[in-house]
Amino acid sequence: MKNKTPTPACGIDVSKDTLDCCYNTEEGLEKHLQVSNDEKGFRQLFKTCAKRSYVMECTGPYYLRLALWLKEQGCSVCAENALVIKRFIQMNKERNKNDRADARWIFRYSQQCETKEWKIPAREQVECQQMLSGIRGYNRQRNMLLNQLHSIETLPWQSAEMKRSLKQMIKKAGAEIEKLQQKLEEKIKVWMPGQSENLQSIPGLGKRAAAMLIVFTSGFEKVENHRQLISMAGLNPVEHTSGSSIRGKTRICKMGGGQLRNILYMCSMSAIKFNKACKALYERLIAKGKNGKVALIAVCNKLLKQAFAIAKSGTLYNENYMNPKPI
């Protein structure tokens, strides 16, 4: 962090219905403006603040329309991680929490910290994210209904009407999951042709894991090496020591894609059976006395390394491939 010369900027706290904005004037004063979160509000905001740097949090779906609209007007847009903004506010010892105060702190963040230009995501990526979210939602609903049906079947007196209703809802949820999964695969094949098939050639990675990796990394365009990919999934190890008294255990970071991390953990259980390299790694760590979960996390990282190599090379997985020795 470093002090910067005041630049024309606008910090925006985005909510479902309104936009709370804080911007600076030529005299260096901070002004507040509240507009509706729709195109009418966007025009009012642009009329007041013109082409300046706009900074907001990339939380939820409500910021996306505004960010796209501002980009179309030729404005500079930064969509910052909400946790970064939260830590910045805490660092400045702010105790109050409201939309107006948040907009003011987002503006001050833009003045004191380096911001990165927001890149417009591919339309296919946004649509695939929606389908993945829908599949997760239907799976949760289906599991809830299955548990409810199971609990009814254990009772001595059972309602036939309720059981019939639950079975119909379970069937409908399953049908919707299959439809969305099929549409998701078709969308990814058009958007990133061949990449899903290549990733699925890795023993242990299935259709859902391959789709999530592609969507999560925007077709692996967001990552330059496997370390970045591991970090994005929150699987990188972190140390917790201080002085001579604090000796915490080394754990994974968990600051990243929790859903991707969960599905990779399930994939690792299959990989230790069918993936030659992952199986050898798992057995070697277990032989050294490592905990089973620790070994599975290492397998998750191995799968991400393999996925990155396959995605960047554009080839199918080859378990007998050997890295060429450097000359």
Image: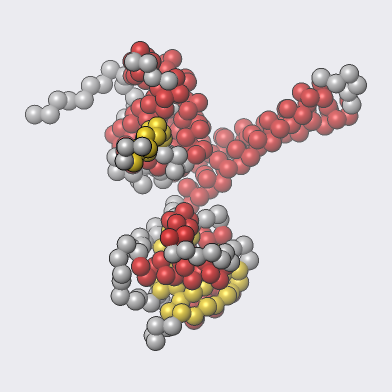
Residue 260 can be seen, yes or no: yes
**Which quarter of the rendering shows the N terminus?**
bottom left
Along the horizontal axis of the image, is 123 left or right of 159?
A: left
Q: Position of residue 56 (x, y in %)?
A: 47, 64
Question: At x 28% / y 17%, what residue is drawn?
Answer: 320
Question: On screen, 229 above or below 263?
Answer: below
Q: Position of residue 37 (x, y in %)?
A: 59, 68
Q: Residue furthest left?
A: 327
Question: On screen, 292 above or below 31?
Answer: above
Q: Which residue occupies the foreground of this view, 75 or 152?
A: 152
Question: At x 32% / y 37%, what residue is drawn?
Answer: 244
Question: At x 45% / y 23%, what residue is drawn?
Answer: 293
Question: On screen, 293 above or below 284?
Answer: below
Scheme of image coloration: secondary structure
Question: At x 50% / y 26%, what residue is drawn?
Answer: 266
**Which quarter of the rendering shows the C terminus?**
top left
Picture quadrant of residue 272: top left
Q: Position of residue 269 (x, y in %)?
A: 47, 20
Q: Which residue occupies the foreground of this view, 42 or 1?
A: 1
Picture quadrant of residue 165: top right
Along the horizontal axis of the image, is 312 left or right of 177?
A: left
Residue 235 can be seen, yes or no: no
